[in-house]
Image (spheres, rainbow, N blue to C red):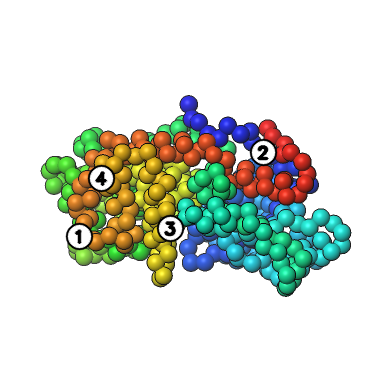
Amino acid sequence: MTEESPAPLLCIPAALRRWDLFCRVIDNHGDLGVCWRLACDLAGRGAEVRLWIDDASALNWMAPQGAPGVVVLPWRDPQDDEVPGDVVVEAFGCDPPAAFVARMAARAASGAPAPLWFNLEYLSAEPYVERSHRLASPQWSGPGRGLTKWFFYPGFTERTGGLLREPGLLARRDAHHRAATLARLGLRLGADDPADHALMLLFGYDQPLLPAWLDLLADGHGGSARPSRAIGTTLLVTPGHSERQVRAWLATRGLHRSEAGLEVGALRLHFLPHVSQIEFDRLLWASDLNLVRGEDSAVRAIWSGRPMLWQLYRQDDGAHAPKLEAFLDLALQGMPAPLARPVAEMMRLWNGLESPARLPVVWAQLWPLLREGWGAACRQRAARWALQPDLGSALLAEAIARSGHGAPATS
């Protein structure tokens, strides 16, 4: 039986039915991924959500069926008949259009209740998150003068806004059929594969360590003895940065073929098309190791309960380093030291924070742990964090408390 937060599902009260969610796509699709999941979560509780976005093209493959209760609008000034909703959420400090904010202020000036205004911040485990969560930001000038914006921080502890996790997610994970997911991709792990064969998902930014890691997989250096031609790893490669890098690595080995799947030594490669968020979740559930990037895929990898390596967005000022260490401090709690040490070192390697020369040694330590403890520890971590309120519930509870509309309805 899957354990999740024992709190009942919060429903949207009538006075907070209309939500506006603003999102800008910067240089990847992680911001959109977070916003779409949040919009769907809120709509599933009865909200009417307008998602304002400057580039919605990725939704064609990310969410091809759309979602009931969610309307996608282009980033622009509001039209004459478009009034602000009861709750306005700007994702990651994206600053809604000035004309829209001015209408929010005008509504408040007319004597009507001002829209609740939240700035949904980026995910981090660093200590400042608990200090900054739920702080007020009064607007003293500009189109929003007189309004108050509230900071809302996702996080990993009960003193933060929690992690996005729609109702029933872990139950769906536990009911998932791995073979069906792989069959839809034309994949079937062979009976001739070694018992310690691993299925891995690669979704990353540009990764300087990737060629050396692929060499290890192709040469069968997974930390256990096997014939060099035995397939030790099937690697699912996502479009974008990862596919470009893997194909460049293939070219260094004289391989320029464009087919979706091919074998290089002990490594079987399968190039994926763009997949929906629903199908991406299933791939995470099916894989023995998930190598993910950014915020949205990292959170989904956490809920998969599978071993993961998280590639953070690299900052020129090195800010990703303390962010990773803060995450490791929480993520490795309860892990025995012989497991936690190589996991932490491999995560640092994957983020450019350790000498690349350590890769063969650390990878050889990790390979047998995929099934001898790492997976169980990740499953326990997911179960532990699922006992905390999820982000959608926490944001709704905050809106209800700030609005003064009494105790939230539940179902």
x, y percent for residue 40: 61, 47
Mark 2 falls on what kind of element? loop
**Amino acid residing under circle 2:** Leu
x, y percent for residue 118: 66, 57
Q: CA distance from mark 3 to mark 1?
A: 23 Å
Furthest-right residue in view? 111
Nearer the N terminus, badge 1 or badge 2?
A: 2
Q: CA distance from mark 2 to mark 4?
A: 41 Å
For residue 270, above or below residue 411 = below
Give residue 366's mark.
4
Nearer the N terminus, badge 2 or badge 3?
A: 2
Residue shown at the point (23%, 50%) measured from the top left: 362
Q: Is residue 71 visible?
A: yes
Nearer the N terminus, badge 2 or badge 4?
A: 2
Residue shown at the point (39%, 42%) measured from the top left: 333
Mark 4 falls on what kind of element? helix
x, y percent for residue 56: 58, 61
Residue shown at the point (77%, 66%) measured from the top left: 146
Give residue 323's mark.
3
Residue 157 as seen in the image, left or right of residue 44: left
Crowding at label 1, few (<14), some or many (≥20) Cα neighbours within 10 Å? few
**Amino acid residing under circle 4:** Leu
**Amino acid residing under circle 3:** Lys
Give residue 357's mark.
1
Furthest-top residue in view? 1
Q: CA distance from mark 4 to mark 3?
A: 23 Å
x, y percent for residue 117: 70, 58
Please say if the residues under marks 4 and 3 sit with CB atoms less than 8 Å apart.
Answer: no
Q: Is residue 51 visible?
A: no
Nearer the N terminus, badge 4 or badge 3?
A: 3
